[in-house]
Structures are given as structure tokens and as C-alpha cells.
Image (tube, coloured by chain):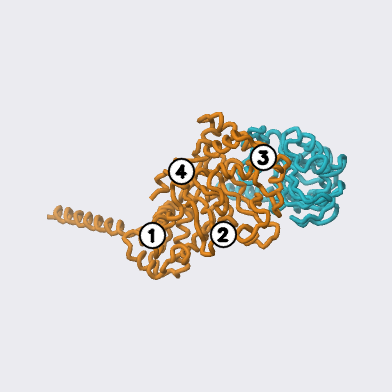
Chain colours: A cyan, B orange
């Protein structure tokens, strides 16, 4: 009987100790990244030809699909923490413009970093899950295989009339990295980090992109894609 | 004597059990078996609405309804307008308003986000409801209830599929919905992914020189078909204006008639090209009788001034036509014919 009592007390202590360790304050947290859009500070009204570019024309935005990959947070000590392998985004599907990290260490961070497009491990035939969205971004095998990094389409108007444009980006050599520096702290509560893509930045800095000179379709033009890649580095900013 | 009583007792017990078994077999059990839809390699996982999960019993019932004139007062069945050898399509339909409409095929519908050329119906599980109306089945619902109730098979099949023991308990609307649920389950089960193209893609067969040339034209910027008709579904599952009409009017306004958005004028649901060889005539109004005519339209007939024309249609390479040589157009048609799946149209699971 005495032995049973000892075992009971010992078990009670063990369980209470275990419970205590579970209820210890967590050292992890989460962040939510959200993406919004603008054209030099103006909100986006899809399908309306109203946004002036530096080249002198006005454009509409009708389609914008793209991938971000290797999305990382940069800790204050410089260590990079991967929070998502890739993210499909469509301007017309709000649910694709918000995504959360898994649990990550709490503490001080100094930036966000990601690729615009798909990293080479995923940019291969069947490199992504077979969703309708991914399948519609396929870069056909006869042209190298993999996926479009971006499909950005609409119409533009200038003195000679209204025409279509389609800025498509793909191929490993056109992948580029975007890094946004800002200090933030991840604590107990989920942190929201709103990013904004200024669509006009695709067409300026360092190169003014003129549809009439550079082409209103980037497909098949390595020169046009190279300009988009160079211009794309600073399309995002924090809200 | 005691032994005799035991034997008699056992005999009676056996007789009772055998009688009980007989009774159990007579009563249908509502325990539907989940239907496992075979998703082909490279295909996305289709979304099946939770209100109408696929079951073996539901698919079997839907197939029976699909081919049964019991649903109509004029002898029509679903299969009257969806002929198996036409990829479950039909050459033409003239609507009550006099419009010519090319009937879309029933192929890979599980992956469609909307239905009809202008997307007037967003749910497959509602698509056939209108067919009970005077334009198609002209169904006498009171008669249908009686026919189903006294039918030797339907009462048990409906119970097994949906747990409904008496169709008289349903309102006419609920009965229609139940029937359409089963037909939708059957249509979701109709999968085509065994064409020559599929076998080529999986390295089981080779293409002819002409098919290979057509494949390259289709899948590169030269023909630029892939942006709207990419593998594996051969549809981008969205609405686009391909420049059929410079000034769309009437039914040619397409998606605009549903959305009211002026940017949708002339836009239509992008059709799948799977089994396209079998589904002539082409375009929403069946204006083209052959694939050669369709290719010629894209080669030289696109109206680039159509308002809201898809930007893809006015690429410099397309602005003045694709400029394909005659043999290249032939190659493109030969490639399109590799999307024909005869195992699909002859599949006994889809036939009566």
C-alpha cells in the first residue's frame, strides 16, 4: 500500500511537471505577408485604360499572374529563414495575395527576401503540383519547359490607337531576387507585413520600357525580358 | 427424446435465420459507396462539391437517367443531344430564340469552373435543371413521379444513391435536383486522357513528322495556341475574345450577356480541344464546319479591332495573321487530331 502511494505521488509530480513545460511561453510566432497593387500611388481599377507610363501611353491591367519563390525573412544577425518555397499570385484572386509563414523564431528581423519567378528546382516540367493555376502557367516543353514567371497583360493607348500588350517572363536566366529592408519584431501575436507592387515600376528604372520601341509583347524577345528583369527589382515596397 | 428436441430446435433456428436473410436481401440498404474518380497523370485534382459527393450508386443512377426517355414527355434523353461518337456533343442546336448554338461536349467536365459558352451556369450540379423545361424535355413532373414510383428499378436505385425511399415525398424542384445530382455525378466520371497525344507525352508512342510539326507550331509562339489551350486540359478555363466579330451583337456578345461588364463583350468560355476532331461544327455558333476552317480563321481571319480582344490575339506575329504555309496548317490540324480519344467515346462505363 505504501509503495502504491509512492508511485501515485511520483506519477502526479511527473504529470504536473510535464504540463508545466507545455505551458511555457512559446518562442515562436508567425507573420502574414499580403500583397496590394498601385500605379504610382493610384489604386488599381482592373480593365480600365487609365494608368500613364513614362513612355507616354496609358495602360489597362487585365491579367497579372506570377510566382514568388524562396521567400525568406532576414534575422537581425543576418541569418535567413525560409518561410515558403513558392507562392502563386493572381491580382484577380485575393486569396493568393495573402500567405502566412509557419512557426518561426521570435525576435528581431531586418528584412524580407524572395525570388520573382520560380527557382530552378521548381522551374521544370511537372515541377509544381498539378493545379489549374499552375497548369495555366506552364512554359511548354518545346520552348524549354517549366513555368511562366509572370503573365502581365492588358491594353495600351497612345496617339496611334489602342493595342494589346503582354509582358510574359520566364526561363531561369530571368529569375531575379528582391530584398526589402525594414526592421520588425516577431512576438507572440501574428505580424502582418503588407507589401505593395507598383505596376508602373515594370516600365521604368533603369530602362524606360516603350511598347512602340521595345515591343508590346515580350514573348520570344530576350531583350524585352531582360529589361523587365532589370526594372522588376524595385517593383515592391512596404505599405 | 431430449436429443430430438435439440435437433428440432436447431432446425427451427436455421429456418428462422434463413427467412431473416431473405427479408434482409429484399430491403435496399442506404450505404452509398464513395466513387473514386481516377485523376489522370498531369491533371489537377477536380473539386467535387460537398453537397453532391460522388458515389458508385449515384454515378450508376446518373448514367441510367442520362439515357432514359423517362425524364421527358417527348422521348428525348440527355444522349439525344450528347452523342457518344461526337464526344457526347451534337452538331448543332437551334434555340427557341432562333440562335444557332454549337453544343459543348461532355468531356472532362469535372475540371470546368463554369458551363455553357457564356458561362451562364457556374455549377455542373445545376446545369441540367433547365432541361426539364419546354425547350428540351418538356417534362410532366406529375407523370415523372408516377413513372419513377412504379418503375421496377428506380425506387431502389434512388434509395441506394440518395437515401430517398419515396419520390412522392419530394417537391418537384427537389426531385429535379436529385436527378440532376446523379447525372452530374455521371458526367464528372467521364474522363478523357488516353489520346495519342497523351501516349506521346508519356513516351509510349511517337508522332508522325506532320503531327510533330503541328505540335511545335501549337506549343510555341509560332502558332501560339498554348496560351489558351495548354496541356493537360487544353483549355485555360476562362473567358476570352478571340476576335470572331469586330462588333459583337446578340448572342455574339458572349460573356457580357451574363456579367454586364463591357470588357466582356465578345468573350466566350475557352473550349477544351480534347476530341476536337469529333465536335464539329466549331465556335459558339458553329460557324466553321471543319478544323481547316478554324485554323484558317486564326491564320488570317481574326478581327483585331474587336473591342476587348484578348491581348494574346494581337501579338505582332498575329497582327497580320499567323502567315502559316499551307503544309503548316495541315500539320496543325493533324496535331489537333492526336487529341482524339476513341477509348473515351467507346468506354462501356459511359455507354448505355
* Residue position marked by numbered label 1 in the rendering: B69
**Quadrant of the rendered image containing residue A138:** top right
* Residue position marked by numbered label 2 in the rendering: B121
> Vertically, is B346 above or below B72?
above
Chain letter for mark 3: B
Dot 1 alpha-carbon crowd within 10 angstroms: few under 14, some 14 to 19, many 20 or more: some
> Vertically, is B212 above or below A134?
above
* Label 4 with label 3: CB-CB less than 8 Å: no
* Residue position marked by numbered label 4 in the rendering: B344
Q: CA distance from mark 4 to mark 3?
A: 33 Å
Tell me, yes or no, if residue A192 can be seen here.
Answer: no
Sequence order check, earlier mark of 1 and 3 = 1
Q: CA distance from mark 4 to mark 1?
A: 23 Å
* Residue position marked by numbered label 3 in the rendering: B322
Circle count? 4
Give B108 or B206, whichever is nearer the viewer: B206
Residue B129 drawn at (x, y percent): 49, 63
Instruction: Give the residue drawn at x 45%, y 70%.
Output: B171
Sequence order check, earlier mark of 4 and 3 = 3
Chain letter for mark 4: B
| Badge 4 and badge 2 both on one subunit | yes
Give B242 or A153, whichever is nearer the viewer: B242
Amino acid at each position: 500500500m505504501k509503495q502504491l502511494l509512492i508511485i501515485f505521488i511520483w506519477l502526479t509530480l511527473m504529470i504536473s511537471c510535464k504540463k508545466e513545460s507545455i505551458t511555457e511561453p512559446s518562442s515562436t510566432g508567425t507573420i502574414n505577408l499580403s500583397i496590394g497593387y498601385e500605379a504610382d500611388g493610384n489604386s488599381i481599377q482592373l480593365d480600365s485604360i487609365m494608368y500613364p507610363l513614362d513612355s507616354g501611353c496609358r495602360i489597362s491591367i487585365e491579367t497579372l499572374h506570377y510566382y514568388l519563390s524562396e521567400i525568406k525573412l532576414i534575422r537581425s544577425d543576418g541569418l535567413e529563414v525560409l518561410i515558403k518555397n513558392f507562392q502563386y499570385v493572381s491580382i484577380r484572386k485575393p486569396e493568393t495575395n495573402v500567405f502566412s509563414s509557419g512557426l518561426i523564431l521570435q525576435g528581431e528581423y531586418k528584412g524580407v527576401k524572395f525570388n520573382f519567378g520560380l527557382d530552378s528546382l521548381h522551374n521544370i516540367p511537372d515541377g509544381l503540383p498539378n493545379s489549374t493555376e499552375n497548369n495555366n502557367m506552364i512554359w511548354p516543353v518545346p520552348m524549354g519547359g517549366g513555368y511562366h514567371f509572370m503573365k502581365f497583360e492588358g491594353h495600351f493607348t497612345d496617339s496611334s490607337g489602342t493595342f494589346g500588350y503582354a509582358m510574359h517572363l520566364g526561363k531561369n536566366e530571368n529569375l531575379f531576387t528582391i530584398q526589402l529592408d525594414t526592421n520588425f519584431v516577431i512576438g507572440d501575436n501574428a505580424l502582418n507585413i503588407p507589401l505593395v507592387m507598383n505596376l508602373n515600376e515594370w516600365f521604368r528604372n533603369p530602362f524606360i520600357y516603350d511598347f512602340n520601341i521595345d515591343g508590346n509583347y515580350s514573348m520570344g524577345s530576350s531583350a524585352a525580358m531582360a529589361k523587365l528583369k532589370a526594372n522588376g527589382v524595385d517593383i515592391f515596397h512596404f505599405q | 427424446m431430449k436429443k430430438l428436441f435439440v435437433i428440432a430446435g436447431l432446425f427451427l433456428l436455421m429456418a428462422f435465420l434463413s427467412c431473416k436473410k431473405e427479408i434482409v436481401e429484399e430491403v435496399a440498404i442506404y450505404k452509398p459507396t464513395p466513387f473514386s474518380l481516377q485523376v489522370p497523370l498531369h491533371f489537377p485534382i477536380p473539386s467535387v462539391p460537398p453537397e453532391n459527393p460522388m458515389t458508385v450508386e449515384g454515378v450508376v443512377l446518373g448514367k441510367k437517367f442520362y439515357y432514359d426517355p423517362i425524364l421527358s414527355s417527348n422521348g428525348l434523353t440527355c444522349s439525344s443531344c450528347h452523342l457518344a461518337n461526337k464526344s457526347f456533343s451534337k452538331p448543332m442546336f437551334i434555340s427557341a430564340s432562333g440562335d444557332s448554338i454549337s453544343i459543348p461536349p461532355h468531356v472532362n467536365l469535372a475540371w470546368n469552373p463554369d458551363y455553357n459558352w457564356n458561362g451562364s451556369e457556374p455549377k455542373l450540379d445545376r446545369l441540367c435543371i433547365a432541361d426539364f423545361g419546354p425547350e428540351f424535355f418538356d417534362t410532366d413532373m406529375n407523370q415523372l413521379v408516377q413513372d419513377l414510383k412504379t418503375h421496377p428499378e428506380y425506387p431502389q436505385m434512388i434509395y441506394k444513391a440518395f437515401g430517398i425511399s419515396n419520390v412522392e415525398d419530394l417537391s418537384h424542384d427537389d426531385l429535379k435536383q436529385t436527378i440532376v445530382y446523379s447525372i452530374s455525378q455521371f458526367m464528372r466520371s467521364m474522363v478523357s486522357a488516353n489520346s495519342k497525344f497523351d501516349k506521346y507525352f508519356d513516351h509510349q508512342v511517337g508522332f508522325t513528322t506532320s503531327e510533330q510539326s503541328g505540335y511545335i507550331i501549337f506549343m510555341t509562339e509560332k502558332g501560339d495556341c498554348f496560351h489558351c489551350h495548354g496541356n493537360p486540359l487544353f483549355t485555360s478555363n476562362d473567358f476570352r475574345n478571340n476576335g470572331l466579330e469586330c462588333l459583337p451583337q446578340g448572342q455574339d456578345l458572349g460573356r457580357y450577356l451574363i456579367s454586364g461588364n463591357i470588357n466582356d463583350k465578345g468573350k466566350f468560355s475557352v473550349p477544351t480541344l480534347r476530341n476536337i476532331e469529333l465536335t464539329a461544327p466549331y465556335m459558339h455558333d458553329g460557324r466553321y464546319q471543319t478544323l481547316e476552317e478554324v485554323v484558317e480563321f486564326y491564320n488570317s481571319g481574326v478581327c483585331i479591332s474587336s473591342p476587348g480582344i484578348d491581348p494574346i490575339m494581337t501579338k505582332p506575329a498575329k497582327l497580320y495573321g499567323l502567315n502559316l504555309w499551307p503544309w503548316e496548317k495541315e500539320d496543325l490540324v493533324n496535331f489537333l487530331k492526336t487529341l482524339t480519344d476513341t477509348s473515351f467515346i467507346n468506354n462501356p462505363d459511359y455507354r448505355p
